[in-house]
Image (cartoon, rainbow, N blue to C red):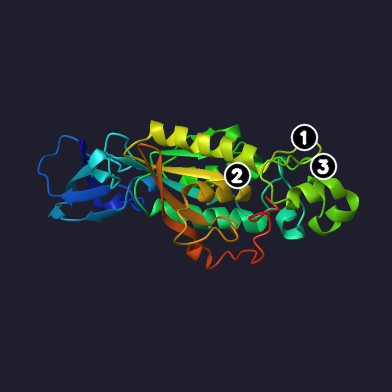
Amino acid sequence: MSTLCTWCHLELSAISLPPLISRHSIVKLSDLHGANNRNRILWWPRTQFVSFSVALQPIPLLLTAVFTLMADTHSSGDAELSSVDRNFTEIVVVRHGETEWNAEKRIQGHLDIDLNDVGRQQAVAVAERLSGESKISAIYSSDLKRALETAETIANRCGGLQVIQDETLRERHLGDLQGLVYSEAPKIKTKAYEALQSRHTNVEIPGGGESLDQLYKRCTSSLQTIASKHRGERVVVVTHGGVIRALHQRAYTGSGQRAGRILNVSVSVLHLSDPDRWVIKSWGDVSHLNGAGYLDSGFGGDRTSG
């Protein structure tokens, strides 16, 4: 782990230290003798520090100190901070935050709808949760705005990682049903609605929509590709309800937790390893939403997709 030392001599009459608070670095303060750097004050952003201990020795009109900054734990070279076994990739799958269309029970599919205010609060809540957990090496997201904004909120809280946009993580294309209120769909687009409700996984939805088989192939291939690039690392993937149900189908062995409704900003953890072994470690956790709230209906997180 790399270190950086900075000598600071602070006049008693003008001491003004910024708050040294965050999650990912350690600051130690210890005594230092010498007076070659009088009045040099180094300021750091709030996001660089987590804790510090202080030992100050009074000198007439001066306090002398040395700051030893230990490297930020989000540094990609900090292998010792990763708790992920080198034999698999840990993928944290997050559904996007709430949209007005989720609240209205309006079918989204590939239509590009923004988060609403509740969705933004949810994104902050899941971001805070993930920032306090193990190191994240990369963040992937569907390129649709509701997922991308959720992912960018997470990235900002987790060391400013660049979000990698991937259209193969998009929601299922729902053809003629997109934009309709779910309860009105049977009357307005009867054939498309019947296709959505079909138990045959190869049925495509009229109007350019995908079958469940097409969705399954697209998103499971995408996740396997991500896993192969990040073996031994922890990766966040922000996507949609229909996609997450397909990922559960790929990993589910017949025992353990069923997919159920995929709630907004729910967190599920998968381990992917060679040869293509998928294991569900946890599923659908929304314990971080105590303050933000969520739609109990989970609209869009079931066969309605969203």
- Towards the viewer: 32 or 167: 167
Residue 179 seen in this snapshot: no
Q: Residue most toward the right?
A: 187
Instruction: Describe residue 233's horizontal placement relative to residue 28 as left or right.
Output: right
Tag 3's secondary structure?
helix
- Towards the viewer: 100 or 45: 100
Residue type (three-letter) at the residue carrying disc 2? Ala
First along the sequence among labels 2 and 3: 2
Residues at marks 1 and 3 touching, judged by CB atoms closer than 8 Å: no
Residue 282, image x and y in percent?
Answer: 43, 58
Residue 232, image x and y in percent?
Answer: 31, 39
> Where residue 45 is drawn, which disc sits there?
none
Q: CA distance from mark 1 to mark 2?
A: 22 Å
Residue 74, image x and y in percent?
Answer: 34, 41
Residue holding disc 3: 176
Residue at 38% x, 39% y: name it.
137
User: Counting other residues with Cα less than 10 Å from the Cα at mark 2, is it few (<14), some (14-19), or many (20 or more)?
Assistant: many
Q: CA distance from mark 2 to mark 3?
A: 22 Å
Tag 1's secondary structure?
loop
Residue type (three-letter) at the residue carrying disc 1? Gly
- The quarter in which the N terminus is drawn is top left
> Where residue 208 is drawn, which disc sits there?
1
Residue holding disc 2: 147
Residue 170 position by quadrant? top right
Residue at 82% x, 50% y: name it.
180
Instruction: Describe residue 130's horizontal placement relative to residue 62 as left or right.
Output: right
